[in-house]
């Protein structure tokens, strides 16, 4: 890679080999050629004057693209598709005269985009399942480990480490569901002519509409699509792009939420993302273990959520049967959206598979606040001993305020000592301590984790690392 020109960090630092290849010139332009082959084959089979030999010659030259010839021709004609038609014709001269017959540029550009996007979504689905599988292992392991809960980032009722992980999983599961719905409804453009009327094919097939439909069915089926859009202009509806980037944005939202939680908890040393033996946390402060992976997830997620705004603006601004002000935007926004989602999920896999729980810190943090969380239970126990509920409530309120004020001065919580020393409360220090088992206050967290993972099991069984390795 040249060091004297700009390169996208998504390509040079973050995205996977699979996604980089998917949106490479080879992948795109070879897909164009495969589409030209499919068009010629269908037209041959349906009786147009195209020979089997011409189709075979096209098939033989799908991969040997002469980029220099195409580039030189594009400089001359200022049209990328016609430049590649020219280069393909040079490679397959017997078929040059029937190449691109009845088609428009959007036949190759738009159908190729739909194929690439479909394959990219399938790949991201595998990565999502890998993240879910790693989080499921984590949630199962820590399903019953109590931890301090937070609302408004203030100490709240205890939960468990595993239960919190299922909240992250639930977000990612909704992304899988959205992605599956998107894939199931993805349609092919087909070969529809300059304004989507198929007028050129009415001429070519002498008005035989069934042959036109069959041609499009055969081309779509060759690329794994079961259906074409029932109507279209020159392009496929740009609402598709909007749905795709919205789905990628949803993935970014889920990833940001998980990474943001981990960053906050790593600040308190309760959780830690992976950290290698020789890793440097700071160039100046050698002791630091910055959560750089989670910070990168959040950083890339912000970019992807912002990038997703491109598609709805483009979809809303299409004029009649087509306008070209979408092209330059889509050329950047869609591939970079996929590369960014890919990078985010690779990081999520790395974090989820190596997340460390510092259980001693988790327990100490919880126990610092547990007396406050347990006050209702303590009050109920005192009532059982003959106390007055309203009077006990006031005792707890008064001592809680005093203990909190003391903690703000840097002292440990002494609420239990205060209650034990107050004759009005009626419980000794050992009796109060016996009620401080954190497991008494986690509700149904372990059962909720078990039930949630059981419901996820059919999907988790499909999980596999998308490209087999994770290198960061």
Image (cartoon, rainbow, N blue to C red):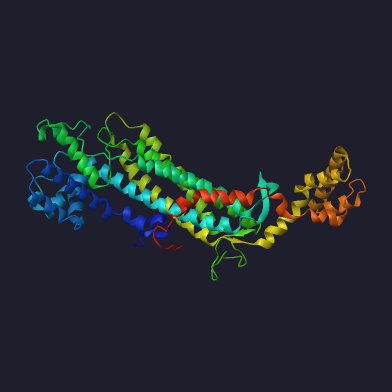
x and y percent of residue 459 in the render? 45, 50
Number of numbered tags placed on the structure image: 0
Image check: 228 left or right of 132?
A: left
Tell which of 463 and 448 is nearer to you: 448
x and y percent of residue 274 in the render? 55, 63
**Residue 469 against residue 203 in the figure, above or below:** below
Q: Residue at x 45, y 55 (%)?
A: 461
Image check: 155 left or right of 93?
A: right
Q: Quadrant of the N terminus?
A: bottom left
Image check: 405 left or right of 291?
A: right
x and y percent of residue 464 in the render? 42, 58
x and y percent of residue 166 in the render? 56, 50
Q: Is residue 104 visible?
A: no
Q: Can you name the residue that lies furthest to the right here? A: 423
Image check: 444 left or right of 49?
A: right
Q: Can you name the residue that lies furthest to the top here? A: 320
Tell which of 456 and 120 is nearer to you: 456
Q: Is residue 15 visible?
A: yes
**Residue 423 against residue 312 in the figure, above or below:** below
Where residue 236 sits, quadrant-wise, is top left
Q: Residue at x 51, y 57 (%)?
A: 134
């Amino acid at each position: 890679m040249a060091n004297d020109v700009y390169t996208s960090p998504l390509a040079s630092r973050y995205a996977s080999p699979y996604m980089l290849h998917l949106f490479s010139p080879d992948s795109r332009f070879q897909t164009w050629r495969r589409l030209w082959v499919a068009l010629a084959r269908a037209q041959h089979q349906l009786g147009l004057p195209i020979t089997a030999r011409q189709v075979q010659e096209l098939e033989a030259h799908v991969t040997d693209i002469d980029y220099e010839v195409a580039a030189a021709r594009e400089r001359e004609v200022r049209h990328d598709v016609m430049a590649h038609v020219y280069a393909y014709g040079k490679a397959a001269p017997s078929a040059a005269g029937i190449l691109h017959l009845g088609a428009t540029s959007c036949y190759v550009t738009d159908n190729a985009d739909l194929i690439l996007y479909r394959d990219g979504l399938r790949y991201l689905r595998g990565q999502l399942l890998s993240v879910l599988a790693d989080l499921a292992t984590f949630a199962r392991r820590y399903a019953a480990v109590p931890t301090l809960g937070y609302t408004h980032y203030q100490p709240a009722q205890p939960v468990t480490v595993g239960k919190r992980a299922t909240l992250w999983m639930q977000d990612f599961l909704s992304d899988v569901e959205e992605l599956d719905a998107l894939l199931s409804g993805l349609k092919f453009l087909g070969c529809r002519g300059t304004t989507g009327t198929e007028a050129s094919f009415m001429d070519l097939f002498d008005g035989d509409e069934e042959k036109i439909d069959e041609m499009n069915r055969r081309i779509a089926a060759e690329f794994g699509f079961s259906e074409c859009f029932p109507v279209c202009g020159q392009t496929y509806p740009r609402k598709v792009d909007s749905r795709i980037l919205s789905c990628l944005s949803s993935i970014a939202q889920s990833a940001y939420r998980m990474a943001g939680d981990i960053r906050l908890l790593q600040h308190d040393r309760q959780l830690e993302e992976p950290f290698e033996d020789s890793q440097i946390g700071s160039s100046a402060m050698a002791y630091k273990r910055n959560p750089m992976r989670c910070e990168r997830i959040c950083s890339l997620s912000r970019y992807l959520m912002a990038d997703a705004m491109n598609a709805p603006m483009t979809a809303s601004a299409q004029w009649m049967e087509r306008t070209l002000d979408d092209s330059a935007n889509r050329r950047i926004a869609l591939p970079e959206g996929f590369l960014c989602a890919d990078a985010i999920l690779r990081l999520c896999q790395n974090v989820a598979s190596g997340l460390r729980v510092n259980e001693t810190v988790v327990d100490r943090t919880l126990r610092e606040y547990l007396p406050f969380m347990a006050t209702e239970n303590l009050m109920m126990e005192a009532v059982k001993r003959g106390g007055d509920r309203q009077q006990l409530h006031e005792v707890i309120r008064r001592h809680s305020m005093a203990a909190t004020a003391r903690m703000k001065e840097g002292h440990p919580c002494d609420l239990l000592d205060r209650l034990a020393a107050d004759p009005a409360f009626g419980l000794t220090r050992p009796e109060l301590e016996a009620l401080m088992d954190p497991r008494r206050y986690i509700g149904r967290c372990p059962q909720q984790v078990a039930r949630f993972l059981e419901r996820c099991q059919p999907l988790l069984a499909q999980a596999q690392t998308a490209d087999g390795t994770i290198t960061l």
